[in-house]
Image (cartoon, grey):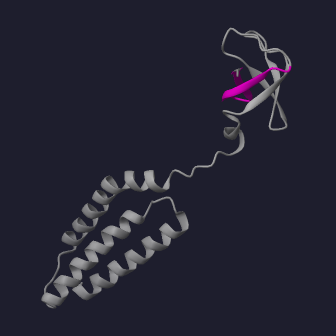
Amino acid sequence: MSLSMWIILWVVVLAVAVILEFFTSVFVSIWFVVGSLVTLVVDFIIYFINKDFQFAWYFQATIFSLVSLLSLLFFRPFVVKKFGKNKVSTNVESLIGEEAKVLKKITKMDTGLVKVKGQEWTAITLKSEVLDVDEIVIVKSISGVKLEVEKK
């Protein structure tokens, strides 16, 4: 395969990786974008130096693989830290940390009932405390379909 065909191949790989990243937006193929871009630049440099030079496929594959892997290892933690902070809690996760009102007495041995965000939930306490009706509690975690609560 001639070097100009390799350049076309790396442009296609670059385009596919960009399109995939656009549709996933979870930093899956961005590392292949970097790898194909570096390999494409190396191919361009070689092509303009000597158009008759035959560039071995395994050399190009090695450049692509190493650059993709190194960019994944070195830049992913930074990118995830920078752009991955905007996690929005959904469904029951959003109840953790919320205040709830006790509707039915809760003890270590018996489940009770609480109202949080307008919904009634079965609740338990993991501490040896009695939570009386109308007491305000904090949702600490979720165990199955029960909220684990404790005194505010």
Q: How many marks?
A: 0
Residue 35 lies left or right of residue 140; in this view the side is: left
Image position, residue 116 (x, y; %)? 79, 33
Residue lying at 71% horizontally and 36% vertically, measured from the top left: 95
Q: Locate residue 139: give its quadrant.
A: top right
Whether 99 is drawn above or below 102: the answer is below
Q: Locate residue 114: give its quadrant.
A: top right
Residue lying at 26% horizontally and 74% vertically, measured from the top left: 39
Image position, residue 109 (x, y; %)? 75, 9
Which residue is more in the foreground, 102 or 148? Answer: 102
Image position, residue 121 (x, y; %)? 81, 29
Check residue 149 for magenta coloring.
Answer: yes
Residue lying at 70% horizontally and 26% vertically, measured from the top left: 138
Whether 22 is drawn above or below 50: the answer is above
Whether 34 is drawn above or below 137: the answer is below
Q: Quadrant of the C terminus?
A: top right
Q: Main secondary structure of the magenta part?
A: strand
Which residue is more in the foreground, 121 or 99? Answer: 99
Which residue is more in the foreground, 52 or 38? Answer: 38
Image position, residue 86 (x, y; %)? 56, 52
Whether 30 is drawn above or below 79: the answer is below
Residue lying at 28% horizontally and 57% vertically, measured from the top left: 70
Q: Locate residue 127: give its quadrant.
A: top right
Check residue 92 for magenta coloring.
Answer: no
Q: Quadrant of the N terminus?
A: bottom left
Residue 44 lies left or right of residue 146; in this view the side is: left
Residue 27 lies left or right of residue 56; in this view the side is: right
Find the magenta span and give its range: 134-150
